[in-house]
Amino acid sequence: MLLSLQWLKEFIPNLKINDKVAESLTSLGLEVSSITKKQRDLIIDIDLTPNRGDCLSVHGIARDLNSLFNKKIKYPRIKKLSKINKKKYIKSLDSKICPSYSCLSITGLNNSIKTPDLIKSRLKNSGIKNINFLVDIINYVMLEIGQPMHVFDLNKLKLPLSVEFANKSELFEGLDDSEYKLTKKIPVINDQSGPIALAGVLGGKKTSTTQKTQNVLIESAFFEPNQIRQSSKSFRLQTDSSYRYERGVDPKLPMVALSRVLELLSEYTTYDSVFIDSKISKKSEKRNDKKITIEHDLITKSLGQDIEKVFILKIFKSLGFEIKVKNTTYTLISPSHRFDIQNQQDIIEEIARVYGYNNFKSNIPTNYIKTLNSNLNTSDILSESLSSRGYNEIISYTMLPKNSQNQIHNNSEIIRILNPISEDKSDLRASMVFNMLQIYKYNKSRQATSLRFYESGKIYSYNRGKKIIETNVLAGIIGGINFNNNLRNSRKKLNFFDLKGDLISIISNLSFKKTNKLNYLVSNAQMSLFQDNTFIGTFGALIPSLRDDYGISDEVFYFELMIDSIKVRNVVKYVDFSRFPKIKRDITLKINNEISIEEVIKCISKSSLKYMINSRISDIFYSMNHENSHKSLTIELIFQGNVSTLSDQEVNEQMTILIKRLKDKLNIDIK
Amino acid sequence: MNTSYSSLLNDLQKSLDNCASSNELYKIKSTFLGKKGILASQFNEMRNISHEEKKKLGQELNKIKTQIELAIREKEKLLNAQKLESKEIDVELPGMNARVGTRHPISITINEITKILSQFGFSKVIGDEIETEFYNFEALNIPETHPARDMHDTFYINVKNLLRTHTSSVQIHSMEKYNAPIKIMTPGRVYRCDSDPTHSPMFHQIEGLYVDEGVSFTHLKGILEEFINLYFGKKMEIRFRPSYFPFTEPSAEIDIKFNNKWLEVLGCGMVHNNVLMNVNIDTKKYSGFAFGLGIERFAMLKYGIRDLRLFYENDLMFLKQFSGIK
């Protein structure tokens, strides 16, 4: 809200116009976001929080600021309405919408005069357009004391009026020239011909006034905040009026505002006659119902510091609270404009903010609370490992373009945002493949040559039962050359085994199984990953058609790990180890192509040979002979005794067992 | 000593002095020590002399043999050392397979913040990003009709589910699970329908919650001031000002002075009793404070990043600037 300090000074005559005012307001929670100098005035912009509807006027701000000065506020002149004759303008009020409604009719008004310069410039400084004299006055009073009002053309009304929910669904033309579709949930002002205003939000076109209008009816009411909010929200329409009503306008204000309008009209122009009508549908809450009782000790305990009783009394008096003290108990009744004061915590906050947050001490609590055991560091530990192996961590949007995941995910899996910010970010990712491809492409097109990326985050999908599933994953992509900084002759293209090696390096007890179930990985170049027999993810080469969509010509490799299934070793049980020399034996096997390497490895590891502590593939040779295509596999076996150095014979015996087993189980010959 | 023997050593020394390669040394070795070498022939000559003399001469010859062996070994060491030094190596060529990976500055910032907070005893908790209205709003004292909902432009998945607009939803889940006392921190992604150079529809927050007996406003101030000073690595000029969040009361915003301007960096407050009551925590016994901050904001301030979009663009030219920090 924009506010002129000269105007504020009318309420607080001793106010000095300088930056200090802004600091004081900010310290009270009325945050000043900017200050603009205008001749002898300062225009400040206040960012009001939604709880402080009472500060949406110059008077409201003055009232709150005064809690620091504790001087008497000077209130603008008003005209007494008690002598004005009544006329029946209001037929009925729905108490759910409108607890009280007042209106003032004026006939023979000279509305063609120019708006006085002071009023005009104050409206302008507050960001409100000049319309015509009467509307300007109404807006001026709204800024001054906070009551929104509306002006109808009296001649166009079929009186009396009712405040009720719309009777039927029909189109309503607002004075902003837009059409609004009414439903039975929308509160409206009806005259005998139908709706003439969206209650508290917007007036109608057909009963609006112009500079030439002489006979008018001015509405000043108290509407239920929730009703106005729902109405405003359903039309996505926020007006100066709805903004104030939904935050709560002082129920005592409507009549005061009309008196102030009449005062200004008398001061600046002429009119013939004035009549008034006012109706109440519901007694406003008894003030005693809003009584809040609080112990001095609770205040001290909550704030962590004792605030003097004298100071507390002074604060609440200056803020317009009724306050009674009995021993150490305060009983308070908040003023009618403070909709936000509901309970003891609200009272404590009032004390704290006027006392000044920055005047409180700072203490570090010394209580010990047991820390929660959590298994949340897996992704961080794996991320560190990947980064130290040359991977760059990325963070990408979890929202992807509409229907962009069709190629690899079923439509029914995809979770969509109902109100996306754009089609570009409307579907939640069901895997990280597309993010990875996009970032790969982006950097490739910016001349990066060696690319390794990973991201730790969530993927989202509906399961078969339409339940929303969120999964924590760590996914990554590699492609391009292995090491940028190597000399040319030692640079190689990154391949499947680079990624496989990286995965082995970062995850303990990792094992692999060939698979072909993922449609986005090349069918014979993908593997499932397991840790201690638990499935933890997959990796492989991305299919060319996916890469093509991103214009990526490099072969790229992708992995996706289910973070929550992976265990990072944190308990180690030490086992005694043998100190006798190890004996190494190589065997070279001639293997038919129908037999997989995995079968051979399994056969060896399951042979439970005595003394064998390790075995690994050390060489492979593929024979291209058409009639007899086979591979030669060299396996290195390590033997070690526990109680003595092994003799050649002891090892030979084991080798014989192994060779026999390979022959029996897989019909493999050694070369 | 037999003169021929001493000349033997002289001869050896001469040969060794002239020897420049291991090949030559090998030849010298066989000349003197080989099966048909000089020493061997000397031993052979002993066949024809008396037992007494044989014994004496044998001892002498063995001594000479040891000396010869030693001299040859010494020369061998020398030659090896010379060979190593003369081997061509240009140490200024690049190292092989150097790998410089990086963590994302947002992860780095989350790590720095959680490290500081864990020193104060906060435990990490992670929550879901797809939430219900109840956990994101109602339980946090933000009813449907409240104008505070305007502060949150929410992405909806369906009538019931939404993308969380803040990490505060994790507070509720955690208090339901652990009740009080509790001291948690919850980093994560949050979403708002908002996009311009200073806002992103997805960003990161971390939320802290501490509920225990006797937690007061001065504790909130103490921990958060200390936290900010530790994060920025020096004593900062800090300002607390009253603000409004439906789930805290009193509520505060913390500004820090940066380049002579106050910048809003953190929202906080004492947990609203309605929130505690929603999760069955006894408000007579317990009180607490909560705070939330934007990770991107903290990262931008620390690293001098001006454009929020850099974080999600993931340009290697940007990412590689963060090598070496965790």
Image (spheres, helix red, strand yellow):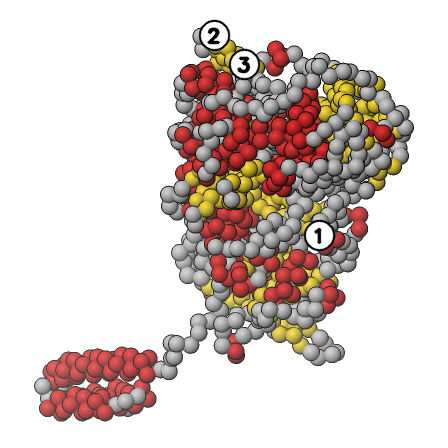
Question: Pointer 3: residues within 10 angstroms few (<14), some, or many (20+)?
Answer: some
Which mark is first along the chain, 3 or 1?
A: 3
In the image, are marks 3 and 2 on the same chain?
A: yes
Q: Can see residue B80?
A: no
Percent across and percent down for residue A574 are 44, 46
Q: Using the image as rendered, state which of residue A114 and residue B173 is in the foreground.
A: A114
Q: Which quadrant is home to the N terminus of chain A?
A: top right
Percent across and percent down for residue A314 are 45, 18
The Cα atoms of the two marked residues, 1 and 3, are separated by 53 Å
The Cα atoms of the two marked residues, 2 and 1, are separated by 61 Å
Chain designation of label 1: A
User: Could you tell whether A18 is left or right of A343 in the image?
Assistant: left
Which residue occupies 52% across, 48% down?
A: B297
User: Could you tell whether A72 is left or right of A394 in the image?
Assistant: left
Percent across and percent down for residue A95 are 77, 19
Identify the image quadrant of residue B168: top right
Which residue occupies 62% across, 39% down?
A: A117
Residue position marked by numbered label 1 in the rendering: A425
Q: Say which amino acid is labelled 1.
A: Lys
Q: Please tell me whether mark 3 or mark 2 is closer to you in this view.
A: 3
In the image, are marks 1 and 3 on the same chain?
A: yes
Residue position marked by numbered label 2 in the rendering: A326
Looking at the image, residue A444 lies above or below residue A149? below
Looking at the image, residue B300 lies above or below residue A226? below
Q: Which quadrant is home to the C terminus of chain A?
A: bottom right
